[in-house]
Image (cartoon, rainbow, N blue to C red):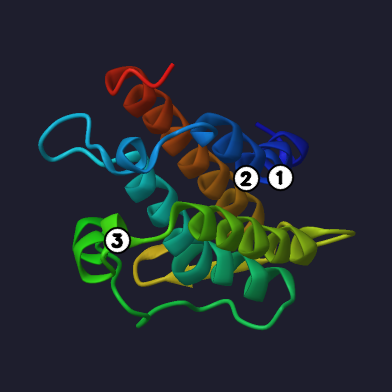
Amino acid sequence: MDKLDNLYLLRNTPNWLAAMTAGLSDAQWRQRPAEGQWSALEVVRHLLDIETDLYGPRVRRLARGEQSDFSGGPGFNADSLATERAYTAADPKKALADFRREREATLAALAGDVDLSRRWRSGSMEGDLGGLVARFANHDAIHIGQLARVRRTIRAY
């Protein structure tokens, strides 16, 4: 995918999440399709955490030229955070609204003539802003697919 494809996906993820969760009852939001798999609410909360704590801040800072070394930051264990932050107790509508707001801030940082070749590193990983945006978009795509499978499994279609 190129920059426009990645931005298209990032821009539309909030809309797709809203459409895919429209009409879910509170119980369906929280229903896990199987033991050890996330509910729709957990998927949305995870995306929110990625937006606020991992990819979002990195993309924003890098796009603005504020930071390029993300080594030494806090670790990110998705399953631990789901438990620690009580994803299943969250308000689904608030989670969607918070995700949309945070994503809009990330997209604003990417607007205009941003240098996608700006380099970053985090520990032994490194790359450029364009690659980081691609990872971010791919992460969204993975969880959009996951949410579609959750809906099918809980028979919400």
Which residue is farthest right?
112
Alpha carbon distance from label 3 to label 2: 21 Å
* Nearer the camera: disc 1 or disc 2: 2
* Residue 139 position (above or below residue 126): above
* Residue 8 position (above or below residue 106): above
- Residue 132 left/right relative to 60: left
Q: Residue at x 66, y 70 (%)?
A: 60
User: Of the residues shown, which amino acid type is indicated by label 3?
Assistant: Ala
From the viewer's side, name the closer residue of 157 and 111: 157
For the residues labelled 3 and 2, say whether their Cβ atoms are less than 8 Å apart. Answer: no
Q: Residue at x 27, y 55 (%)?
A: 88
The crowd level at tag 2 (other Cα within 10 Å; few <14, some 14-19, many 20+) is many
Q: Horizontal and vertical percent for residue 146?
A: 37, 31
Mark 1 or mark 3, which is nearer the start of the sequence? 1
Counting every numbered tag in the picture gives: 3
Residue ID for mark 2: 14
Q: Residue at x 45, y 71 (%)?
A: 53
Image quadrant where one finds the N terminus: top right
* Nearer the camera: disc 3 or disc 1: 3
Alpha carbon distance from label 1 to label 2: 7 Å
From the viewer's side, name the closer residue of 37 and 107: 37
User: Of the residues shown, which amino acid type is indicated by label 2?
Assistant: Pro
Classify mark 2: helix, strand or loop: helix
Q: Residue at x 37, y 43 (%)?
A: 26
* Nearer the camera: disc 3 or disc 2: 3
- Mark sitting on residue 89: 3
Classify mark 1: helix, strand or loop: helix
Image quadrant where one finds the C terminus: top left
The crowd level at tag 1 (other Cα within 10 Å; few <14, some 14-19, many 20+) is some
Classify mark 3: helix, strand or loop: helix
User: Of the residues shown, which amino acid type is indicated by label 1?
Assistant: Arg
Residue ID for mark 1: 11
